[in-house]
Image (spheres, rainbow, N blue to C red):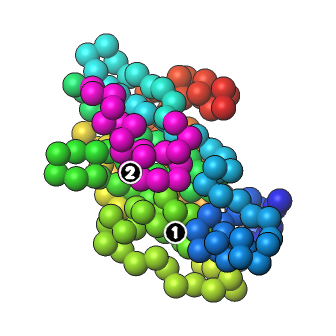
């Protein structure tokens, strides 16, 4: 389903309307309405490793789209000696970059307002010690999305923080398109696009 959203510049673009997966979903369950759960999430989770042979990519289990713990577990289980991180596209609405480390997770959430409806986004804000935005439906429609987190989390792997900020600021793109831009910039676009095509 598509809805029209007017952004601050007074231009109009299309965005895909998502189904809630958190409090709203529980409320709808109480009223008998048919709504989505984390099991119904679209999108894809991809693990990325850079080792001596170059970039290696694969698909994470679908539960990584609904839980930060599940996504982090999927990365840890790779037991890679190289740099490893996850690219999580949830419903093509927002994305998360997760880079686990010994001192904790390094995280970037492309749209903080997604935490109103999605558990994964809320998990990320909780990890960052940032409150979920308190916006009603009307306010949400009139609010441009904004990113939160560590903009430099992939800088040592070839993606400058300023470039990542520019990619996230392209609000007319869907999450999978944002991630394709990141993959192209970092040099693993071909394999990433193969995984998108296979989902």
Q: Relative to 194, is 85 above or below? A: below
Which residue has dot 2 on it?
69
Q: Is residue 130 left or right of residue 184?
A: left
Give coordinates of residue 73: x percent, y percent: 36, 41
Identity of the residue drawn at 46% across and 67% down: 122
- The quadrant holding residue 158 is top left
Give coordinates of residue 136: x percent, y percent: 63, 86
- The quadrant holding residue 126 is bottom left
Which residue has dot 1 on it?
115
Depth check: give the residue in front, 35 or 94. 35
Identity of the residue drawn at 71% across and 71% down: 29
Identity of the residue drawn at 41% across and 40% down: 86
Which stretch did the figure color magenta?
A: 61-80
Q: Secondary structure at mark 2?
A: helix
Classify mark 2: residues with Cα within 10 Å, few (<14), some (14-19) or many (20+).
few
| Magenta highlight: main SS | helix
Looking at this view, name the residue that lies furthest to the right.
1
């Amino acid at each position: 389903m598509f809805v029209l959203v007017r952004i601050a510049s007074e231009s109009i673009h299309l965005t895909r309307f998502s189904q809630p997966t958190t409090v709203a979903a529980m409320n709808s369950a109480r009223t008998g309405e048919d709504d989505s759960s984390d099991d119904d999430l679209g999108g894809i989770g991809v693990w990325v490793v850079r080792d001596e042979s170059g970039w290696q990519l694969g698909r994470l289990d679908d539960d990584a789209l609904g839980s930060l713990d599940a996504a982090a577990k999927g990365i840890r289980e790779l037991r890679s000696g190289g740099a490893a991180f996850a690219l999580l596209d949830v419903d093509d609405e927002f994305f998360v970059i997760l880079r686990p480390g010994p001192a904790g997770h390094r995280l970037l959430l492309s749209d903080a307002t997604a935490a109103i409806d999605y558990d994964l986004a809320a998990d990320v804000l909780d990890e960052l010690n940032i409150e979920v935005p308190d916006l009603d439906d009307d306010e949400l429609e009139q609010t441009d999305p904004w990113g939160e987190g560590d903009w430099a989390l992939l800088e040592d792997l070839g993606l400058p923080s300023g470039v990542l900020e520019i990619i996230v600021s392209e609000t007319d793109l869907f999450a999978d398109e944002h991630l394709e831009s990141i993959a192209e910039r970092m040099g693993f676009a071909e394999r990433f696009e193969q995984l998108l095509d296979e989902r």
